[in-house]
Amino acid sequence: EVQLVESGGGLVQAGGSLRLSCAASGFTFDDYAIAWFRQAPGKEREGVSCTSSSETTTYYADSVKGRFTISSDNAKNTVYLQMNSLKPDDTAVYYCAADRDCTVVAGRVPWAWGQGTQVTVSS
């Protein structure tokens, strides 16, 4: 069974940090890119970041460049999203997804999704 399980969300004050984790199972991790998306109430889903399994390709949305860092631990089949200098606008449900490559952030429905983790940034 293909599974993507996010963790690490929570409530943090503006300027704070969180690290999200996406643990993958049920498929060959090295064959897929892992992307992070977020969706806030009333807003469209946004592709936040993405990495190929070898980290040869990484993507960041302009809204998070310089503040978020994506990394991959292939031994643990886990991708992390380190989020620093968080802002209230970062408040959303964050989802990880697997797909063949990072072009998935442009809007294609990913091959697999996680259940999401809530991130709330208070001002």
Image (cartoon, rainbow, N blue to C red):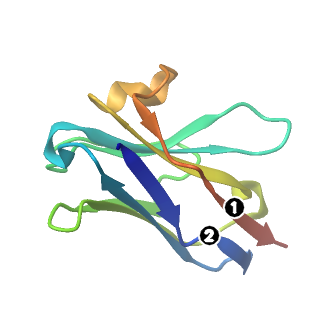
Give the quarter of the figure containing the C terminus.
bottom right
Tell me the residue that label 1 is attached to.
118
> Is residue 31 shown left or right of residue 91?
left
* Quadrant in the rendering for residue 78: bottom left
Give the quarter of the figure containing the N terminus.
top left
For the point 82% across and 73% down, which residue is it?
Answer: 122
Using the numbered discs, state the Cα–Cα distance from disc 1 to disc 2 in whole angstroms: 5 Å
Q: Looking at this rendering, what residue extends furthest in the front direction?
A: 1
Asked which secondary structure carries label 1, the reply is strand
User: Pointer 1 and pointer 2: residues touching (CB < 8 Å)?
Assistant: yes
Please tell me which of labels 1 and 2 falls first in the chain.
Answer: 2
Q: Is residue 44 positioned above or below 49 on the image?
A: above
Tell me the residue that label 2 is attached to.
9
Q: Amino acid at mark 1?
A: Gln
Asked which secondary structure carries label 2, the reply is loop
Bin the neighbour count of mark 2 within 10 Å (Cα to Cα): few under 14, some 14-19, many 20 and up. Answer: some
For the point 59% across and 47% down, which residue is it?
Answer: 63
For the point 53% across and 42% down, which residue is it?
Answer: 62
Q: Amino acid at mark 2?
A: Gly
Q: Is residue 53 positioned above or below 13 on the image?
A: above
Residue 80 drawn at (x, y percent): 38, 64
Residue 103 drawn at (x, y percent): 36, 25
Mark identifier at residue 98: none
* Quadrant in the rendering for residue 79: bottom left
Residue 77 drawn at (x, y percent): 24, 60
Q: Nearer the viewer, residue 118 or 14?
A: 118
For the point 72% across and 78% down, which residue is it?
Answer: 12
> Is residue 53 shown left or right of residue 5?
left
Residue 100 drawn at (x, y percent): 26, 28
Would residue 86 be visible to someone looking at this image?
Answer: yes
Q: Is residue 42 positioned above or below 106 on the image?
A: below
Q: Nearer the viewer, residue 24 or 120?
A: 24
